[in-house]
Each structure stands twice: as C-alpha cells, then as structure tokens.
Image (cartoon, helix red, strand yellow):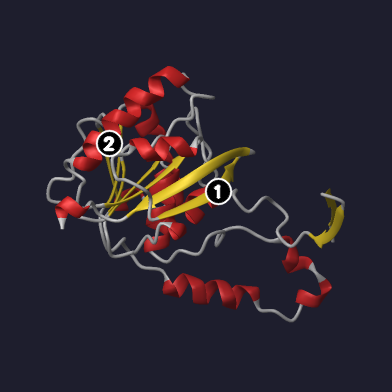
Amino acid sequence: MRLVLRASAGRLTLSADASGGLLHRRGWRQEISRAPMRETLAAGMLALAGHLADEPLWDPMCGSGTLIIEGALAARRIAPGLGRRFAAEDWPVAEAVDWAARRRRLEAQALAHAPAPVVGTDVNAGALGTARRNARRAGVLDDLRLERLDVATAAPGAVGPGLLVANLPYGIRVGDRQSLAALDAALARTLAGPFAAWRVAVLVDDPRRLGRMGRGSPAEVHSLRNGGIPVTLGTWLASPRSR
C-alpha cells in the first residue's frame, strides 16, 4: 500500500493511494494535441454543464477529442477506468470483494451506441486525425461525427439543439494573446447565429473572456484547474432570442 503525505497551508494530509495510476489516464488517450486537457477535467466539465445522454453534444474546437470522447463514453454509460486495474484491488481488506462481478455488472449497463449525435469539428486536420485514433482506442469512433470546420462557419444543420462545449485556447501553449480576441469574436457570432438555441459551456484561462461570448452573464461560473493552470468554466442556457 502506497501512502501519500501532503503539506498545504500548514495542514498535513495522509492518504492511501487506492488508484495506483493517475485517474485521468483512462488508457485511450495515447495521442494529444498541442493544448490537451485531462480526461477527468473533461468529464467534470460535462457534468457541471449538465450534459444529458439523450441530447446532442458539439465541440467546435475538438482538438484531440477529449471532450467528445468523454461525452460519448458517458452517454453510453461506460464506466471510467473500466478496463484498468486499481491499487485497492490488492489491499488485504479488499480480498472479499468480487471485482470481476462488479466489472460484469458495469459492462452490462453499457449501451451499444450513444443515444444522440456527438460531433467534433476543428480547423486542424491533424487534430481531427488524432481525435479519430483516440476515439477508436476508446471504442466510441462509430458514435462520433468528425468534420473539418472553422469555428466561424460551424453550424449544426438538422442536429440539435443540445449542448455546445469548448476548451478555448489560452494563449499560453497555443497561439498568442492578441489572436484570442478575434477567436472569441468568431465564436460569439457562431453562438448568436447557428447555435443560438443551444446551451453553451466554455472553459477559459481568463474569466473576463466569458463576457465576450455574446450570451451575457453566465448562468453558472466554476473555478477549476487544467494541468496546474487556473481556468474558469462558464455555462449558459439557450439564447433568449431563440426561445
């Protein structure tokens, strides 16, 4: 059993490592884009945004596909980490647990297909290739629709309405700060036009950028961290003009 001692703000916490490998390592993400987000953050972002299995999900800047893959896995009720082993399985107190039976029960709950469309678009063809390979390893490639589209021209067509999610570039790893205003303006036009009837959730490095989305004040704001970087999640209901 591995014990972890952590000191923070004058407080010591002693923990037993029940996981072993880091929880965000699901096993499918063997390739990443230039600005990746952890699988656990993607799953948490979708949960905070109120993602529903039977509503369409769209990521207009999908990169390596983390958000849409986690969305498809959740929609199909595939338990995170189902294919991995956990350190707690080797603890003496866990000997009486039938781990195989628990896995069988979880596998029986999984759906064969996602109940609603899951769409990822990106202007970068290389990123879409990475997303496609990651989705194949995760077993959800057939549940996704991947297309090369710029955020300024993305449109749902007959899909939706549903939930649009995006992890916006921070100007730290990708691009520069000056280009972010133009990107935000393009996304705001898309949210006000083709996706006006959709709910929206975006993750940004600077909470002031939430005011540039053209949706007014977010319904909810959450302070999170992405690989040590403080980030902010803002969520909105559908635009009032679309109701």
Residue 43 placed where, x, y %?
A: 49, 54
Is residue 49 shown left or right of residue 18?
left
Instruction: Please name the amino acid that badge 1 sits on.
Output: Ser
**Vertical position of residue 91 compared to residue 125: above or below:** below
Quick one: label 2 or label 1, which is nearer the N terminus?
A: 2
Residue 119 placed where, x, y %?
A: 28, 46
Q: Are marks 2 and 1 in contact (CB under 8 Å)?
A: no
State the residue at coordinates (31%, 62%): 113
Determine whether the residue tagged by mark 1 lies in a helix, strand or loop.
strand
Which residue is under mark 1?
223
The crowd level at tag 2 (other Cα within 10 Å; few <14, some 14-19, many 20+) is: many
Instruction: Please name the amino acid that badge 2 sits on.
Output: Ala
Dividing the picture into quarters, in which one does residue 83 lie?
Answer: bottom right
Q: Residue furthest bottom?
A: 96
Which residue is under mark 2?
188
Is residue 210 shown left or right of residue 92?
left
